[in-house]
Image: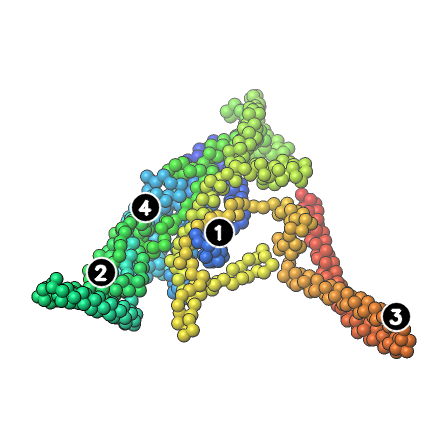
Amino acid sequence: MKINQKGYEFAHDEQLSRENKDALEEQGMPTFTINRILPVVEMLNFYATAKNPRWQAIAVEGSDVDVAAVFSDLADYVWHNSEGSTLYSNAVNDCVTKGIGYLLVTVDKDADNGLGEVVIQQPEPFDIYIDPKSRDMLFRDAAYIMIRKVLPKNHLMKIFPDHKRKISSSSSDEQSQINYSVRATGDDDQKLFTYNDNEDGNLAISPKGELDQLVEFFEVYEKIKMSYISLFYRIPPDPATLKQLQQQCDVMVKEMQEESKVELLEKQRQMQEAVQSGNMLPERFELEMRKAQEESQQQLEVFRRECMSKLQAEASKIENKIITEKEFNILMKDPQIAKNVVDQVQFYSSRIKQTCVAGDKLLYESILPDSITEYPLVPFHYKWTGTPFPMSAVSPLVGKQQEINKAHQVMVHNASLGSSLRWMYEEGSIDAELWEKYSSSPGALLPIRPGVERPTPVMPAPLANAFFQIVSEGKGDMEYLAGIYSSMMGDSSQAGETYRGMLALDEYGTRRIKQWMNTSIEPGLRLLGKVILQFSQATYSAYKRFRLIQPSSIQEGTDREINIPVYNDLGEAIGKSMDIASIKYDVRIVQGSTLPVNRWAYLEELKQLMQLGIVDDIAVLAETDIKNKENIVKRKSLYSQLQGQVQQLSEAIKDKEGTIETLERQLVQAGIKQKVMQADVEINKKKEEVKSQMGKQYIETEGKQKLLRNVMANNLESQKQQAANMLQSAKNSLDAKDNNS
C-alpha cells in the first residue's frame, strides 16, 4: 500500500520530496524536518521486543509430558542459534513502519555436518505477495504465498549450487529492479546502493568487478490437498509361530478325531441292534455307516481349516499405516499384501508445496515433510484490515508530521526575516551591492545619494500564535494517535508524584500497546512456535545434544538431549527416548513474555515474597545484576553448612554433659563411695577428654566461620566502594557537563 510506503519513508526521515525541497529553497524557506515519528517507532519496538518470547508445548497424552517440556528448550535453542532477538526486532520494526513484518522458518541443510539445523530468517515485506483473497489474519487460508527477489546470477548460483546450469541459462528481465521507496532507490541528494546505478538497469556488479545479469527469483509456497489412505492390515505370524500353531491345531484335531470314532462306534452298535431285531435291513446298515464315516471325515477337515484359520487370526497383528493414494495403489497390486488388508479409509490432508523459479527456469518443486502443515512464513501485523494489506502505526501520523514540519518551517523563516531586514529603495538611490553586502553588519555606514528618499526597511508580518499552537497540539495529537506518551519516554514533567503513582501511570499508559500485543503480535508468535515445532520434528530425527544459554539464571548453561537411542541386551537399537517426532503437541505462547517488566517493582515484589517465605534469597539473587552470582551462592551454601556443623557439635557437647551428670547421680544414690570416688575420677577424666575433643572441633569450626565472615565482609565492602566510585564518577560527569554548558 502506498500509504504504508509513505509512512516508512517518513519514519526514516525521508519527509520531503525533491520537488518540495526545490519549492522551499526557491522561496528561501528552510528544508529541515523534525522527525517525531521515529521515537514512536522506537518505543513500540521496545515494548514488543523487551524480552525474548517463551513457548510451552502441551502434550496430547500424559506419557509425553517429559518430551513436551523439552520443546521449550529446543525452541529457545533455535531462537538463539538464529539471532532471533535481532530478527524479531527487525520484523516488529517492519510491522510498525510498513504495516507488516515477517519471520521465515527454514532448514539449513548443510549445518551440523549435513544433519541440518532449523533456522529463522527475516525477509523483506515488500518482497512478499499474499493471495489477495486471503481473509485470515495469519494467512492460513491463503492459496499461495510468493517471495520475489531480484538477485545477481552469480549470487543465486551460490545459493543453489546444484542448479548452476539452469540459473546461468535463465533469461534476465530488463524491467527487474528494486523500487520500494526513496530510501531503497536513492535520489539526487542521497545516493544509496541500487542495482540500477549502472547504465543497463538489469545488470549488477559481480565480485570480480564485472557486470553481472540480474534475474528475478520466485519462491512460491502453496497449500495443496493430498489424498491419503488410512490402511489397516494384518501381519501374519512368522514361520516359527506357524509351526507352533500347526502343532496346536494337530492336537485339537486329534482330540476331535477320537471323539468322532467313539460316536461312530455308538451309532454302529445301535444300528446293529436294529438289524438283529429286524427293524433295519443289512443294506441300510452298510449305507448309513458309509455316510456317517464320510460325514465325520468332512467335519474333521472343516474343523482343521477353521482351527488353523482361527489360530492364525489370533496370532496375527493388526497394524495401521498412513500412506498416499499412489503408494496404496502400488501395494494393492501385490496379491499377498491385498489379501491381508483388513480395512481402508480415504481422507485428504493439507501439505505445503514449494516451487522455486529463476527467470524462466524451474529450479525445483518439492512437497515439504508430512509434519509441516503451516506456511513457513509467519506475519506480524500492526492493524489488520481484514485483507493482506494491513495498516502501519506511522500511517496516521504522516499528516500531523507534515503539519508540524510546515509550522516549524514558517516559524524559522519568519524569525530569519526578522533578523535580516529587507529594504525598499528608490532605484538608483543607493549602491545596491554595497547595501546587500553590509546592511546586516553591526556598525556599518551605508551611503545614499543626495536628494533621494531614504531606503525603508520592510518588516515581516507578526507571526500568528496559531503556528505555536499547531506545533504544541500536533505533538499531543501524535502521542494520542500512537499511544506513546511523554511519560513513557522518560519525561519527568509527566511523572507521578509517588512511586506507586508512576507504576499506575505506566500500567494505564501501556494498555493500548498490550492490546496490540495480545491481538496481533502474540498470535504470530504462537504460530511461529508451532512452525518451529513442525520443522524440528521433520529435521531432528537423529540423536542431538544442544546447550542452552541462560544468562539471567544462577546456572548459565544447561545441556539437553533429544532422540536418545535405546538398546537391548544385545546392543541393538530398539527405539528412542525423548523422540520429538513421535508425539503431538499443542504449542502456546507465554502471554506477555515479550513485554518489559519494571525491574525495581519486580525486585520489590520478590523481597516481599521472600519475607513471607514463598521464595528464598537465592531466587531473589538470580534476578539481580550482581556479578559472580554463582560464587556467592556457593559461599552462602558453605557458610550454611558450617553453621549447621557448629550447631550439631554444640548439641553433642550438651548431650555428653547430660549423660555424665546422670551417671554421677546414679553412683551417689547407690551409696558405693569408693566406686563413686573412682568413678568420679574417671568421669572427670572422660569429661575433660570429651570437652577437649569437642572444644578443638568447635574452635576449628568457629575459626572457619570467622574467616568466611571476613571474606564476605571484604567482598561486601569492595562492592560498596565500587558502587560509591561509580556514583561519584557519574556526579563528576554531570558537573562537567553543567560547567561546559
Q: How far apart are marks 4 and 1 (CA)?
A: 29 Å
Q: Which residue is drawn at 77% across and 65% down?
A: 651
For the residue marked with disc 3, what is the amino acid? Gln
Q: Circle 2 sits on which residue? A: 339
For the residue marked with disc 2, what is the amino acid? Lys
Answer with mark 3 or mark 2, whichever residue precedes in sequence: 2
Label 4 secondary element: strand
Q: Answer left or right for 152 relative to 579.
A: left
Viewer-proximal residue among 171 and 454: 171
Label 2 secondary element: loop
Mark whose residue sits in front, 2 or 1: 2
Q: Circle 3 sits on which residue? A: 669
Label 1 secondary element: strand
Q: Quadrant of the C terminus?
A: top right
The answer to which quarter of the image holds residue 719 is bottom right
Question: Label 1 near label 4: C-beta < 8 Å?
Answer: no
Answer with mark 2 or mark 1, whichever residue precedes in sequence: 1
Mark whose residue sits in front, 4 or 1: 1
Image disc number at residue 144: 4
Mark whose residue sits in front, 4 or 3: 3
Q: Quadrant of the N terminus?
A: top left
Label 3 secondary element: helix
Q: Distance between the residues labelled 1 and 3?
A: 74 Å
Q: Residue at x 34, y 56 (%)?
A: 369
Q: Where is residue 379 in the image (x, y as percent from the top left)?
A: 41, 45
Mark whose residue sits in front, 3 or 2: 3
Q: How crowded is mark 4: few (under 14 residues within 10 Å), some or many (20 or more)?
A: many
Answer with mark 1 or mark 3, whichever residue precedes in sequence: 1
Answer with mark 2 or mark 4, whichever residue precedes in sequence: 4
Q: Distance between the residues labelled 3 and 2?
A: 100 Å
Viewer-proximal residue among 624 and 183: 624
Residue 447, can we see it? yes
